[in-house]
Image (cartoon, rainbow, N blue to C red):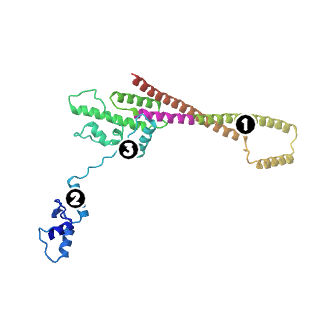
Amino acid sequence: MVSIRRRKLSGQCNGRSSLVPLCSLPDNIVREKTEGSGRPVSPNHIPPVSLNQQVEIEKEMEMIASPPAKKQKIHAQIDPENPMEVHAYLMKLKEDNKLELGPLQRSEEMSVKEWMEKCYPHIFRVFPQNPKVFFQFSDKSKQNELLYCHYWLFLFEVRNIVLMDYGVSPDYVESLGKVIRTLEMQGFDCRFMRSEMVMVGNMMKQQQEIMLAERNMIAKRTVNLEKELQDLAKQKGKEEQESDKRGKKIEEITPNIETLSKQVNKLQYKRQREPNKLPCADLEQEYVEVILARHKRMLVCKEEEGKRLYQVLEKINQLHQNKAVCSSL
């Protein structure tokens, strides 16, 4: 009875078989018991274990028996038809350099779809793809190679759209539209690409407005320079007429050396007091002509840029119109 009461008090007997095997106990518990008592411990003796230690040991045993599974990363879910969400997500990928395509060797043990989702989860798990296979090959490896090429064409298209800048040509935009239509015919979901093209069109419109403002400013400055050049030409003509009149007067009147030297000194002193004016009207006119020629070249460049942006916007609009026609069919 005494031993049963002691075991109840020590937590070893609670009406159920809750004994913990000795092998599962930490080594320090056994050492403390043997060092505390001078008597040798029998092999059948079980040292007392507190309830908290017992719960911890049970948890450790459960973790050893069934280790926790690795938590899979939860990827963002983006609406492919929302241009703002798509653009923000793709720009984040661009900043993190996650659109760089490295030379990866495909695994033969996994399917092409699983392999691409594993290598590029930020694209194929956010925008799932289920391409169709139109050309059947007797050799399965050739079939997988063709599908693998289509996936790479899809990745190149995404990267080209994200890296597009204001200097893109209309032919380049037209080729992108053709590739998008080809991928859609093969079963790829390119809605997020079209959403990104909407944002590209908006950026092109903003650039067009900036370019028109710059063009108007340059055109206004060019007109002012032309008027200034005309005024300088008139002033030069007047000065030539005055110099001719002075020359005739000098020829008619016998020159006096002293009076002429005084007049020359006065003219030199007057020019020194007017530093803002150029010493020669010919040099001023030449300077204005150079600035005017530069402004005319800038004006031509802005006009060509305006035509290019207009054509780029036309190609983007055609891409959206083709989408509307395909959806109606």
Q: Amino acid at mark 1?
A: Leu
Query: Mark 3 sits on what residue?
Result: 98
Nearer the observer: mark 2 or 3; the answer is 2
Tell me where residue 49 sits by quadrant: bottom left
Question: Which residues lie in the magenta part?
Answer: 192-210
Q: Is residue 77 above or below residue 329?
A: below
Which element carries disc 3, helix, strand or loop? loop
User: 77 or 151, which is in the foreground?
Assistant: 77
Q: Is 136 in the magenta? A: no
Q: What amino acid type is highlighted by mark number 2?
A: Glu
List the residue tagged with mark 2.
Answer: 58
Residue at (20, 30) in percent of width and height: 139
Left or right for 241, reference 329: right
Report the residue marked by disc 1.
Answer: 232
Vertical placement of residue 224 versus 49, above or below: above
Image quarter of the N terminus? bottom left
